[in-house]
Amino acid sequence: EVPFMKAIDEFRHAKFEDFQAFEIPCNEENISMLFVLPNKQNGLRALEESFKFQNLTNILPKLRNVTLSISLPKFKVEFVEELSNKVRTLGVENVKKKVTLSGINSNDNIFMYQLIHKSSIEMHENGTESAGGTY
């Protein structure tokens, strides 16, 4: 069974021909999560196929504050990406780099061989938590 969170509150919302959208503010200032839902019960695939980034520029200015009753599953999304190859495409020839970590290790032969980014977003009834780091 999937745990849900429920709220009746004021959210920014807009209706469109094929979908509706609402925005939930995150705990950090000026950050929010936009939910886009198809108007047809089985319309998610069609919405995914037709949705383009340009739609966002049309949605955001049309959002208005309204009272909504929402029910969403609690969730956590994690993303991990090894970035060494992507950094090389930006012109960094060799990710292998000598790193000075004298505060934690006296060994002068410590090198960085990988560049990894990890981030996560968790949404629950107490708000949204996010974390990220590159190592």
Image (spheres, rainbow, N blue to C red):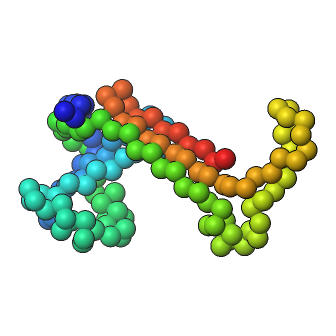
Left or right, residue 40 beside residue 58: left
Q: Nearer the viewer, residue 39 or 8?
A: 39
Please provide percent x and percent y for residue 28.
Answer: 48, 37
Residue 61, position as x, y percentages in the image: 33, 58
Residue 42: give x, y in percent of width and height: 10, 59
Q: Residue at x 76, y 70 (%)?
A: 93
State the residue in front, 125 or 110.
Answer: 110
The answer to which image quadrant residue 36 occupies is bottom left
**From this viewpoint, is residue 38 visible?**
yes
Instruction: Tally the numbered discs.
Output: 0
Q: Which residue is drawn at the image coordinates 66% and 65% (left, top)?
A: 87
Percent position (x, y) of residue 71?
19, 36
Q: Nearer the viewer, residue 44 or 53?
A: 44
Q: Is residue 109 above or below residue 90?
A: above
Q: Quadrant of the N terminus?
A: top left
Q: Is residue 82 left or right of residue 60?
A: right
Tell me what residue is drawn at x 48 percent, y 50 percent.
Answer: 79
Q: Does residue 64 appear in this view?
A: no
Q: Nearer the viewer, residue 36 or 119?
A: 119
The residue at the far left in this view is 41
Is residue 1 depicted above or below 42 in this figure? above
Residue furthest toward the top? 126
- The quadrant in which residue 19 appears is bottom left
Q: For the point 56% across and 43% down, which residue is it? A: 132
